[in-house]
């Protein structure tokens, strides 16, 4: 039986639905940083090898086709629609839901096997067609390359990198330093650094409601300044936000700091910058006729767009 685009993606969809119904959501906890970065490099190496050595084989030929573009984009857009239609809950809350939609992972869809499989297909297709354009002889189309490389990086970092994202909240007291933070599920997480409140300032409106507040915090003997919407970046992909404080006393005895860890944040930002550069080149050059590859039954031919 000849492998066709429809057959391949139907099998992938059937596989993802079956695995989702049997084992539940994708185990993102196994892909935390730096393993996700290693996975990205390994994935790119496999894409390179697949295009250079195996591009005439059925799977690679299909993933390079325009039909694969329609399938992968359609899968991704339908997934985004499901995310918008169903309330997205935490993993613990989603498990408590009952019914068919719950079995399909609709209440935590970004972590479902269905969405992850579709995203893997899109990223693989995107990587292959970008590599093909990069290796074409003659003048490079930098608009195409920048847009597609940027999109690949942004999607990978935004979705696959979510396994490494962590949001913690920690009460910071005046009296004693504290290093016990809490996850969104209420679990205790011991930090490698302690925080202690040194000073707190609140500015009020004439009616007595808070207008602005800031905190001076000691982070392992190092003073840092925190304000609302002005985070402090401690290290790569780790930001400290001031979220609330002790409103029961005129001299707050504690404040609450939110720690957001996003190791692949800068990879996503780099991808966005590359897409902006590609869009800028598109604006400068305008639409032009260009030569590209068009797939026939088992060959590629050059055609003008």
Image (spheres, rainbow, N blue to C red):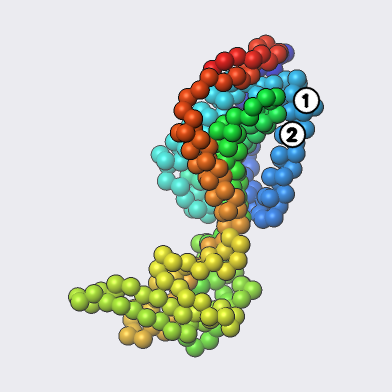
Residue positioned 57% across, 75% down in the render: 180
Q: Can you tell which mark lies on residue 34?
A: none
User: Which quadrant is home to the C terminus?
Assistant: top right
Q: Is residue 236 above or below residue 130?
A: below
Q: Is residue 61 left or right of residue 211?
A: right
Image x and y of residue 197, in percent: 48, 82
Nearest the viewer among 24 and 282 is 282
Q: Is residue 235 above or below residue 203?
A: above
**How many numbered discs sit on the rendered protein?**
2
As drawn, the label of residue 54 is 1
Quadrant in which the N terminus appears? top right
Number of residues whose C-alpha sits closer than 10 Å to that of mark 1, classed few (under 14), some (14–19) or many (20 or more)? some
Q: Nearer the viewer, mark 1 or mark 2?
A: 2
Return the residue found at the far bottom: 175
Q: Secondary structure at mark 1?
A: helix
- State the image coordinates of residue 298 (x, y, percent, origin top left): 71, 13
Residue ID at (74%, 43%): 42
Give the CA distance from mark 1 to mark 2. Answer: 10 Å
**Residue that numbered label 2 is attached to:** 48
Question: Mark 1 or mark 2: which comes first in sequence?
Answer: 2
Q: Nearer the viewer, residue 132 or 70?
A: 132
Q: Answer with left or right where residue 86 lies relative to residue 202.
A: right
Q: Can the viewer see residue 1?
A: yes
Please tell me which residue is depicted at 47% across the width and 76% down the height of the picture.
Answer: 225
């Amino acid at each position: 039986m000849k492998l066709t685009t429809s057959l391949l993606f139907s099998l992938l969809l059937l596989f993802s639905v079956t695995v989702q119904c049997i084992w539940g959501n994708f185990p993102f906890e196994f892909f935390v940083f730096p393993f996700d970065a290693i996975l990205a490099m390994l994935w790119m190496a496999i894409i390179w090898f697949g295009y250079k050595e195996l591009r005439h084989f059925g799977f690679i030929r299909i993933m390079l086709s325009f039909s694969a573009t329609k399938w992968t984009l359609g899968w991704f857009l339908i997934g985004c629609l499901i995310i918008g239609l169903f309330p997205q809950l935490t993993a613990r809350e989603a498990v408590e839901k009952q019914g068919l939609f719950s079995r399909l992972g609709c209440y935590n869809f970004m972590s479902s096997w269905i969405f992850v499989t579709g995203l893997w297909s899109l990223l693989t297709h995107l990587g292959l067609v970008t590599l093909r354009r990069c290796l074409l002889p003659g003048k490079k189309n930098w608009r195409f390359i920048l847009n597609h490389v940027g999109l690949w990086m942004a999607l990978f970092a935004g979705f696959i990198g979510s396994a490494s994202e962590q949001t913690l909240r920690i009460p910071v007291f005046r009296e004693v330093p504290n290093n016990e933070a809490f996850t969104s599920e209420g679990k205790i997480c011991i930090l490698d650094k302690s925080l202690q409140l040194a000073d707190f300032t609140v500015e009020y409106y004439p009616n007595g409601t808070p207008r602005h507040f800031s905190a001076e915090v000691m982070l392992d003997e190092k003073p840092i300044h925190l304000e609302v919407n002005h985070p402090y970046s401690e290290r790569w992909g780790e930001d400290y936000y001031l979220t609330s404080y002790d409103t029961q006393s005129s001299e707050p005895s504690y404040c609450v700091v939110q720690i957001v860890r996003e190791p692949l944040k800068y990879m996503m930002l780099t991808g966005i910058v590359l897409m902006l550069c590609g869009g800028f080149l598109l604006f400068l050059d305008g639409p032009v006729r260009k030569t590209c590859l068009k797939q026939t039954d088992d060959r590629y031919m050059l055609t003008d767009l």
